[in-house]
Image (cartoon, rainbow, N blue to C red):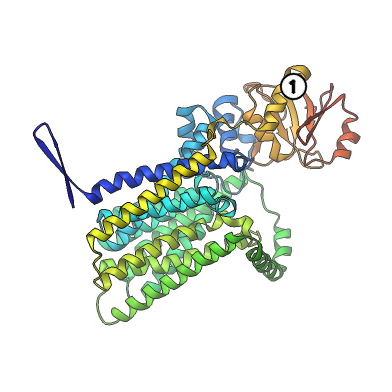
Amino acid sequence: MTICIKHKNKSFKFSLNQLLIPFSVILLLLSIYVFLNSAQNRGYIKIFFDADMLYLPSLYRDIFIDKFSLDGWRFSHVQYFFPDMFLYFLILIFSGNLIISTFLFGIFQALVLVFSSICLIRTVCGDTNPQVTVIVTLVYTSIFSIGSIAGGNLFELLHYVFKHSFHIGTFLCCIWGVIFTMQFLQTKNKKYLIYILTISILAGISDKLFVVMFIVPLFTTIMILRILRVLSQKTVSKLGDRITIASIIIIIFSLLIKINNFVESPDLSSKLDNFGKYILILVRSINNFGSDIGSNPNAYLILFFYFSIIFSSIYFIKYFLDRFRNTQIKNRELNILFFSLFSLFSSSFMLLSPLFLGLYLNIHAVRYFIGIVVLSLNLLILASIYNLRKNQIVINQKIYKYFIISVTLIAGIGLFATGKLNKVKAFISYYPSLSQCLDKYSNDYELTFGLSNYWNSSVVTNFSKKNIIVNQLNPDLSIYHWLNNKHWYCGEEKASYINPKYTFIITEGLERNRILQQFGSPRKILMCEETEIFIYKKNLLRC
């Protein structure tokens, strides 16, 4: 079906597929917008601005506003330099607003995820048909729509797609690493080797999980394809050399930041002690995951997507190995075989990654599994497309058009209905109640500098409209130097403040009796909802 538009004696012809692409993209944007706004009404908004999410805003403020020395920083073992930090800082420079930047980052990251999936599927099957773009876009539109409508556990699973500093940017680098690898296998163009090396170094030094997501699965995949004589020794050597170089650079960088005390050095003796208990930890982790299956639907979802990867991969691997046992495999089939093997290994390593990091394999580690969901969706779409082609099934164009229009209209009605139901409250109006309360009493009690646990400190500091600064302590009231700058506690001459006077402490998460024992009785106790604040006249932290 072709639509003809006449304007000033000129005719412009468009196919229905060409018109559906921008329409499906607009629908995708609406689904993303409603998903983010639904967080406000459902009480999930805090998870977009908790202490972990405020790592990048705090670092940005330290560099560009407060101007403290960076040598006092203590990072986590995952620094998220690329792409998260680069993109978030760029957005924050132009927007100048923490909440708007988080909102825009979430939208952009979700769009990049959908675009990357489209490019991945088109590269794998060698198809430039606009139907692929429409189908993939509508699949993600439906998922985000269902998440915003259903809320609960499904929302908790999907919301990581919109968050920085939670490995999603790393997985996007993984997708593009796969795309560049398949482009190299097709063309043997050396520029793709440069792309693979560059993205591996940038993503690997930023997040070691990239090694689990991409480098190890890629190495395993090309070695198996070499054993099966699908890839030549020369091709495997070129790819192997690049990922080896990247791995060496990642290791050197990790050692350098540890030597310079930017991250906490591991206690080797405790690591050796824990190694002896690894089997017990593994059994306990599996038991915890099994318990979660009975109480959290996300566990079912993760297992469903993982097993769909297994079945899809086995189907493709068996089919192509049987078909091309005695013949030369073609580029398109090589891409599908490569992607199937890679998805199988990458998803398996991702499923076990919490164990590699010393965490239990439970639903609280769900951020490590988003890649499994995306790989599964891409494989399922790919399997559907390939089966139609293999069996030479041609969908009636009229049925296809009505089907796409119907799905689009249903999704659109659902999105608008959800938006009306939730009143689409402004995401950018978020103002934490604790920050509001402290700002309210700041003038009455001269609240400028205070102390709290890790979870409250960065929230108050970043959201206070009265420029209240709160630094973090351990429960025993010792300084907690993690994801912060040690110079914040006493200030610096060239920074925004020096010799601060700490006159209040937020007791939540700290040992209350120790506070009374160490600092004495407060002159005033404020209650900010259920949070208790002790106010003193003296300085609680002397430098």
* Residue annotated with mark 1: 441
Q: Nearer the viewer, residue 366 or 43?
A: 43
Q: Residues within 10 Å of mark 1 (few under 14, many from 20)?
A: few
Q: Secondary structure at mark 1?
A: helix
- x and y percentages locating residue 41 in the rendered image: 58, 40
Drawn side of residue 373 relative to residue 489, left or right: left
User: Does 258 sit above or below residue 381?
Assistant: above
Drawn side of residue 353 relative to residue 243, left or right: right
Q: Residue at x 26, y 69 (%)?
A: 389
Q: Nearer the viewer, residue 47 or 10?
A: 10
Drawn side of residue 76 relative to residue 111, left or right: right
Q: Would you identify the image quadrant in which residue 228 lies? A: bottom left
Q: Residue at x 35, y 70 (%)?
A: 337
Q: Would you identify the image quadrant in which residue 67 lies? A: top right
User: Does 332 sit above or below residue 41?
Assistant: below
Residue 499 shows in this picture: no
Q: Nearer the viewer, residue 221 or 110?
A: 110
Q: Nearer the viewer, residue 533 or 56?
A: 533
Q: Amino acid at mark 1?
A: Tyr
Quarter placement of the C terminus: top right
